[in-house]
Image: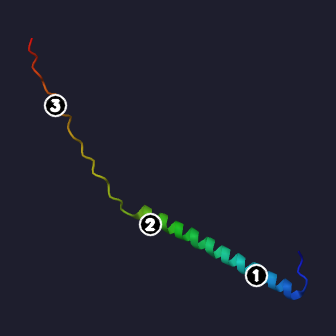
Amino acid sequence: MAPETLEDAIADSISDSISDSIAGSISDTISDSIEHAMRGAMMHEWPVPEIRVHPMPKPKVVPRIW
């Protein structure tokens, strides 16, 4: 629908540019936040879980009585 007057055209133009600017700003902020979080996660020293190896238990020798 075409704007009817010059004022409508100006208002539509301003409205479109403001909404585009806000959408772009939100998108940039989200992508920056994700990038920052990823960088922080990669640089963080994650604790290495300690793996304890238990020796195999010796089999019990049961004397057989014949």
Query: On the rendered image, what quadrant is the N terminus found in?
Result: bottom right
The three-letter code of the residue at mark 1 reads Ser
Residue at x 43% of width, y 63% of height? 41
Q: Separation of disc 1 and disc 2 at Cα?
A: 37 Å
Label 2, secondary structure: give it: helix
The three-letter code of the residue at mark 3 reads Lys
Q: Which mark is residue 58?
A: 3
Q: Which mark is residue 40?
A: 2
Residue at x 12% of width, y 22% of height? 62
Label 3, secondary structure: give it: loop
The three-letter code of the residue at mark 2 reads Gly
Label 1, secondary structure: give it: helix
Residue at x 85% of width, y 83% of height? 9
Residue 15: image quadrant is bottom right
Query: On the rendered image, what quadrant is the C terminus found in?
Result: top left
Q: Is residue 28 above or below residue 43?
A: below
Residue 36: image location, x then y, percent? 50, 69
Q: Which mark is residue 15?
A: 1
Q: Separation of disc 3 and disc 2 at Cα?
A: 47 Å
- Horizontally, is 57 left or right of 3 in the view? left
Residue sticking out furthest to the top: 66
- Horizontally, is 41 left or right of 54 in the view? right
Residue 25: image location, x then y, percent? 63, 76
**Dot 2: few (<14), some (14–19), or many (≥20) neighbours within 10 Å?**
few
- Horizontally, is 20 left or right of 62 in the view? right
